[in-house]
Amino acid sequence: MSSRIIALSLVFGFVASPLFAGPQRCGTRVPTDDETAVIEQQLQAKGRKPTSTIAIPTYVHVISAGAGFENGDVPESMIRAQMSVLNNAFAGYTGGPATGFSFNLVGITRTVNARWHNMLIQSREEREAKAALRQGGGDTLNIYLTAGGGYLGWATFPSSYASQPKQDGIVVDFRSLPHGPYAEYSEGDTATHEVGHWLSLYHTFQGGCTPNNDYVSDTPAEARPAFGCPSSRDTCTRASYPGIDPVENFMDYTDDACMYLFSSGQVSRMKTAWTAFRQ
Ligand SMILES: [Ca+2]
Ligand SMILES: [Ca+2]
Ligand SMILES: [Zn+2]
């Protein structure tokens, strides 16, 4: 990647991995400052920390364009491997604290629909597919496996559930599942990252070098996404931003092999958001 393209990327806010020619990492919409303020207010007003562990019923909706893996017809073995990755990550088995969240696969649906398979974020196809397929209430995770619409995945936040319950869930590029063809994004952490959003987490680089940044106090502020695994990078260097960038965090943009933990502050935020918005 030339310095000219990097400069253009900064100007236009375009974020692409310099190492990966495929889709962009995440399409989850960044809430506006006003929306963020309301979410923080509601978290403080309504959120309590649940003491027990939380088992989340999970539906996986395979939306393919036809038969065969290349059309998104994902075998059940890959879905089960994805559930293991998700559970290991949230149990803290790969690093960091146990979150207290676990995921029980309760159903797999299979739909052949090329339009839905190629859904874009916030498109008519996304709305149609989710309205037709979504199961359960706010406490139920719905994972839609599609061609990703140019992203490895995207998610809705818990605060959106009340106004748009049918659109709640995560969309994941089927090729990002464990043992998929996406090299650095083939360990299943796209789903882990998107579930982090679904449980209220922002990107670690949200807000950049600002006091609130991602509204989690123990994730060091980070100026911009990290790609690859730049393990000693420090993009917010003023004394008020101690710590190197949290590139090992599931909510950054690094390679799957590089990200392996949620922080204690993120666990606390997810639990509070659960009681505020999903119970
Ligand atoms: Ca932070
Ligand atoms: Ca720093
Ligand atoms: Zn994201």
Image (cartoon, grey):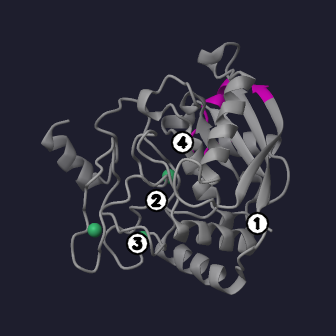
| Marks 3 and 4, how far apart at CA | 23 Å
Task: Specify which label sits upstream in the sequence, 4 or 1.
Answer: 4
231 lies above or below 187: below
- Mark 4 and ligand 3: say if the CB distance to the nearest ligand atom is below 8 Å: no
Dot 1 and dot 2 residues touching (CB under 8 Å) = no
Q: Which residue is mark 4?
A: 189
Disc 2, SS: loop
Q: Residues within 10 Å of mark 3 (few under 14, many from 20)?
A: many
Q: What's under tag 2, amino acid-wise? A: His
Q: Which residue is mark 2?
A: 203
> Is residue 113 something one can see in this rendering?
no
Residue at 50 percent of width and 22 percent of height:
181
Q: Residues within 10 Å of mark 4 (few under 14, many from 20)?
A: many
- Mark 2 and ligand 3: say if the CB distance to the nearest ligand atom is below 8 Å: yes
| Marks 1 and 2, how far apart at CA | 20 Å
Quadrant for residue 49, please give it: bottom right
Dot 4 and dot 1 residues touching (CB under 8 Å) = no
Residue at 68 percent of width and 23 percent of height:
74
Task: Specify which label sits upstream in the sequence, 3 or 1.
Answer: 3
Task: Specify which label sits upstream in the sequence, 4 or 2.
Answer: 4
As drawn, is 239 to the left or to the right of 81? left
Q: What's under tag 1, amino acid-wise? A: Arg
